[in-house]
Amino acid sequence: QVQLQESGPGLVKPSQTLSLTCTVSGGSISSGSDYWNWIRQPAGKGLEWIGHIFTSGSTKYNPSLKSRVTISVDTSKNQFSLNLRSVTAADTAVYYCARDPRQNHFDYWGQGTLVTVSS
Amino acid sequence: SYVLTQPPSVSVAPGKTARITCGGNNIGIKSVHWYQQKPGQAPVLVIYYDSDRPSGIPERFSGSNSGNTATLTISRVEAGDEADYYCQVWDSSSGRSYVFGAGTKVTVL
């Protein structure tokens, strides 16, 4: 059973970079044809897809965030990461990592981590 | 960009049937996926490819998709079904790729 776990700072100052890591267990991140995703959810609001990475390193981002987002993968650690630059209060949200088994939906999710942007 | 429209809320009595709709332009030609999210928890996939159930999801959960509306149906509703439900599609014409509906809060009376 694949498990995902987000980690990273819970508080980020405005204009700084939000950095999160998702550790995958129960399977190799590079063994399949999966897309590894970041999704966020502001308090009381819906889900927003941020972007994903394939184990080859190819990425795709939500156009609304593309100028500020980088997703990378470290296959040796079975992890993938999110960097979101120049954050504002509007980036305060629960951030989830999730797997798409290349079937255009998300079958495994991390528990989520709350990131607050505040000085 | 592609937009999915869900009712904000649906109320249902225990033992009855809840139907949650997801509207979109010609959504019937797309594959629709549904997630259940309980407070403080991550979403859980309950229906994929319109009507398939992942392992462990009760048969009470079913889905359909035709025309401009996809529907998640929960039969014999239980108190534990109270949650937010989100529909999702993959839209190749939109840079957003994965598009979510705004969610429907299901309240069990």
Image (cartoon, coloured by chain):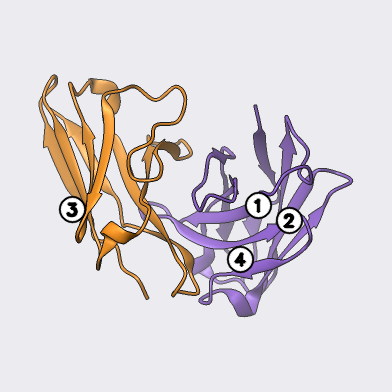
Q: Amino acid at mark 3?
A: Pro
What chain does badge 1 belong to? A
First of labels 2, 4 by sequence position: 2
What chain does badge 4 belong to? A
Are discs 1 and 3 less than 8 Å apart at CB?
Answer: no
Residue corresponding to mark 2 = A81
Q: Amino acid at mark 2?
A: Ser
The quarter of the image holding the N terminus of chain A is: top right
Residue found 61% across the figure and 54% down from its top: A37
Q: Position of residue B48 (x, y in %)?
A: 41, 42
Q: Front-most of B93 and A29?
A: B93
Q: Name the front one of labels 4 and 1.
A: 1
- CA distance for labels 4 and 1: 31 Å
Image quarter for residue A61? bottom right
Residue corresponding to mark 1 = A36
Q: Position of residue A47 (x, y in %)?
A: 43, 55
Chain A: its colour in the image is purple
Chain B: its colour in the image is orange
Q: Amino acid at mark 1?
A: Trp
In the image, is B85 to the left or to the right of A90?
A: left
Q: Front-most of A47 and A37?
A: A37
Residue corresponding to mark 4 = A119
